[in-house]
Image (spheres, helix red, strand yellow):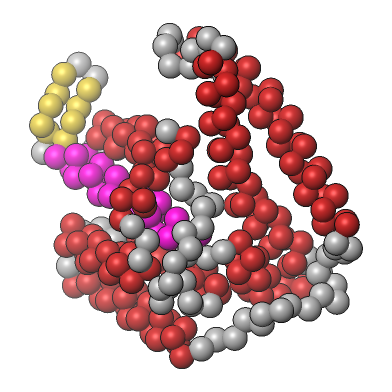
Amino acid sequence: MIRDITIGQYYPTESKIHKLDPRTKILGTMLYVVSLFLVNNLWIYIGVALFLGIIIKISKVPFKFMMKGLKSILFILLFTILLNVFITPGETKLVEWSFITITLEGVLNAALMGIRLVFLIIGSSLMTLTTSPIQLTDGIERLLNPLRVIKVPAHEIAMMMSIALRFIPILLEETDKIMKAQKARGADFESGGIMKRAKSMIPLLVPLFILAFRRADDLAMAMEARCYRGGEGRTKLKQLIYKRRDAIAYLLLFTYLGSLIAARIIL
């Protein structure tokens, strides 16, 4: 399960999505997330699925690799679907027993909510899979640059977000190693009730926190050894410059968003 989490990982390959400016991918992901909340019809979801499938195909990231990341949110996905099934009111009742009422509207709403959550995870992870940590930092910093007028530390915020994303796969790898070491010593993380499983996680959390603080300290020392003093006066080896492919990507993205809005109004 730990190895199935793909959030924060970067999949290096040569594709048109990888070559896009990181600002284009960040803004595109934000607009894509907004577009998911405009969808209220199954046919529109099919259009979103086709658009997402085309983007995944262009990115050259294996579809199996992206679907592997859904295993880590399977519990949240099932909980969301069941919650919507039982709490969504409706006129067409399918099951009515004691205080439990399941309606056709609730089942449809739960299905659409589950699809929306899957699309959200896949679309968001596509940004980190096709953008290296350095590019992600530069893109966030450039997008936050206008906020420097009101004294917002754009570089520092971008650096913290990039380090946090980069630390996710590192800590997951360390967690996997600690779990294997504890299992070799007879630890059991899978059997028993919820309370027993929670108590069995204590031998896992303590060394994980120690390793996390140790890695953070090593990172701070490495940055100081390289005379890192924040973003003031720093220059970049590779400057972010919008190119023709970014303009085409923005055009396609706004066309997709406009089509969704038109389809919502018509349907």
- Above or below, 87 relative to 149: above
Q: Position of residue 104 (x, y in %)?
A: 14, 40
In this rendering, would 122 be left or right of 18?
Answer: left
Task: Please report the bounds of the magenta region as a residue range.
Answer: 104-129
Along the line of sight, the residue nearer the viewer: 71 or 44: 71
Residue 240: name its quadrant: bottom right
Residue at figure coordinates x 66%, y 80% from the top left = 238
Q: Residue at x 56, y 64 (%)?
A: 132
Instruction: Identify whether 86 is placed above or below 35.
Output: above
Viewer-proximal residue, 73 or 2?
Answer: 2
Horizontal side of 254 relative to 243 (left or right) equals: left
> Going 78% across and 65% down the picture, which residue do you hit?
153
For residue 249, above or below residue 93: below
Residue 33, quarter of picture: bottom left
Q: Is residue 266 above or below residue 176?
A: below
Q: Quadrant of the C terminus?
A: bottom left
User: Which residue is depicted at the point 36% across and 51% down?
Assistant: 65
